[in-house]
Image (spheres, rainbow, N blue to C red):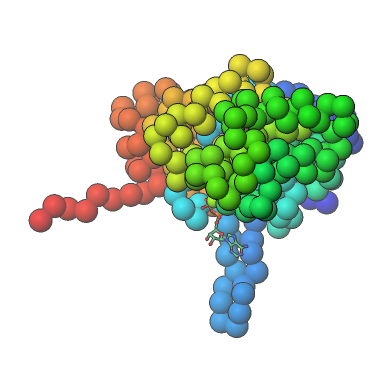
Amino acid sequence: MSAEATKVTTEPGLSVPAAPSAVIRIQGLVVEYPARGFGQSATVAVKDLNLDIYQGEVFGFLGPNGAGKTSTMQVLLGFQPPTRGAAYIYGVDVREPIARQRIGYLPELTYYYKFLTAEELLRFYGRIFRLPRAQLESRITAVLKLVELEPVRKRLIKTYSKGMQQRIGLAQALINHPDLLILDEPTSGLDPPGRMQVRELIHRLKTEGRTVLFSSHELGEVETVCDRIAIINRGELVTVGRVADLVRQYQMDLERVFLKLIGYQPQPQP
Ligand SMILES: Nc1ncnc2c1ncn2[C@@H]1O[C@H](COP(=O)(O)OP(=O)(O)O)[C@@H](O)[C@H]1O
Ligand SMILES: [Mg+2]
């Protein structure tokens, strides 16, 4: 175990002493993928990332493609072991399966079994989380209403539009009544009304006191829904803070702050 990890208790149920309200604590995280073939080098996807996310925050995780957002989330979910460093959720080391119990997760790419109806899919996930049978049906109805798919609950998912498929993904992420939601690009590929619906849903989750971590490169929506953001580039954290503070500090809108911090150079006009 690394030096950082020993500082923090990993016993389930106990919080991290230094910051009791940190829902997510990432300490010195490095994620490295081994070289795939001869002559190839390893990819360092995340480089020494330190980040705390607090109870009730809507936190935007920004970065260009390949920045390391998905890799970080995969560590939080226990799908990818940290190469170095550690991460804790509610004070529990993410390598312990129990850490996942209070999380809802929307993957970047959703591959659901398309020959199921929405309600069948949710029943399947509800059973994975061992929701008591008596609660399962009412919970399915509640989440379908929340994502506005209740009227089409008996339709096969393969007949759903992209926006509807994204919303059934969100319903799946919510089925276990999670306190923490980790959403990997929840609005990618959605049209403006679809994006607005997801934004409203995130807002509603916030008013219910849930913590939301989501990745995006839609800067406009990040500006409207996030309490704080982090920008990562090539695996490194380049800034973290409140949107309003960053805009004030740099005297430019969030999109320009983002482009500046990731080192984008405008091409000279001929
Ligand atoms: N399973 C993997 N094996 C090897 N390299 C990977 C794997 N997943 C991601 N990468 C690489 O790690 C880097 C970060 O990727 P990723 O975490 O998906 O970034 P983002 O989600 O910000 O687009 C990229 O260079 C990507 O090519
Ligand atoms: Mg990604």
Farthest bottom residue in view: 38
Residue 226, x across and y down, in percent = 51, 27
Residue at 55 percent across and 22 percent down: it is 203
Q: Can residue 139 be seen at all in this image of the molecule? A: yes
Residue 215, x across and y down, in percent = 53, 41
Residue at 57 percent across and 37 percent down: it is 167
Residue at 67 percent across and 28 percent down: it is 143
Q: 270 or 226, which lies in front?
A: 226
Q: Quadrant of the C terminus?
A: bottom left
Q: Is residue 270 left or right of residue 252?
A: left
The total number of labels drawn is: 0
Q: 183 or 55, which lies in front?
A: 183
Residue at 61 percent across and 25 percent down: it is 146
Q: Quadrant of residue 34?
A: bottom right
Residue 91, x across and y down, in percent = 79, 33
Q: Quadrant of residue 83?
A: bottom right
In the rendered view, tell whether residue 193 sits above or below residue 114: above
Residue 19, x across and y down, in percent = 73, 26
Q: Is residue 253 left or right of residue 198?
A: left
Q: Is residue 71 left or right of residue 4?
A: left
Farthest left residue in view: 270
Q: Can residue 125 be seen at all in this image of the molecule? A: no
